[in-house]
Image (spheres, grey):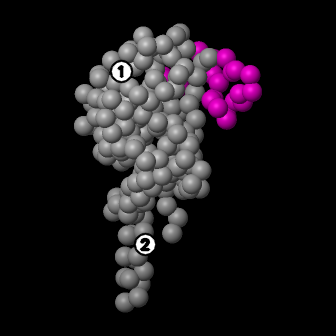
Amino acid sequence: MSRKGSLIIISGFSGAGKGTVVKALTAAHDNYALSISATTRQPREGEEDGREYFFKTTEEFEELIRRDELYEYAQYVSHYYGTPKAYVQEQREAGRDVILEIEVQGALAAKKKNPEALLLFVTPPSAEELKRRLIARGTESMDVICARLARAKEEAKLMDQYDYLIINDDLNACVEEIHQLVMREHLRMEENLDFVSRIRQELKDMQ
């Protein structure tokens, strides 16, 4: 039975390890496709259009906004970033489960446009562990780490709007937990109405 892929939206605190989780999930299972964002910033060395990002001019991006062709978008340091609907829909129609790894505000905006999306929030087991991981990266000053923790405090206020909480304590267990949730989504009745209609007709034809 051919089926439409699910839409999985993953958010989490900076330092929660969501990028590592997503990378491990896509490496372990071949049914996933990562969403590709559109941006108006210039490509960096080695980046290709349609692989890392869809690179757009400001005029092209604003046209996507006008046509309501983005699930969500935001502006950072004078550049736009957003999630194009067309690529996600194309992958889902091909039966791939599409992952959007985006921040909280964008995730909730995308969920509003796709109520059927599976909304997952990735977190370490404690705030102390989150701080430890941020420090252990060794890439940022304490001022930046404190700013990230302050942002996490604000993001935590919206955690209960997600469908599932994923505690990233053991990477392999975390990956398998997410995969099982996605597989369970495939069994939802509203995701299988075409099959229901077909088997009803087959049973009717047997009489």
Q: Quadrant of residue 87?
A: top right
Say if residue 176 shows up in the picture: yes
* Residue visible at 37% across and 82% down in the picture: 204
Kindly identify which residue carries mark 2.
198
User: Observer-nearest residue: 86 or 24?
Assistant: 24
Q: Which mark is residue 149?
A: 1
Q: Amino acid at mark 1?
A: Leu
Residue drawn at (28%, 29%) of the image: 156
Q: Which residues are magenta?
A: 42-68
Q: Nearer the viewer, residue 175 or 7?
A: 175
Look at the image and say whether residue 60 sits in the magenta stretch.
Answer: yes
Q: Is residue 57 shown in magenta?
A: yes
Q: Quadrant of residue 40?
A: top right
Q: Amino acid at mark 2?
A: Arg
Specify the quadrant of the image occupied by residue 135.
Answer: top left
Judged left or right of residue 38, residue 129 is: left
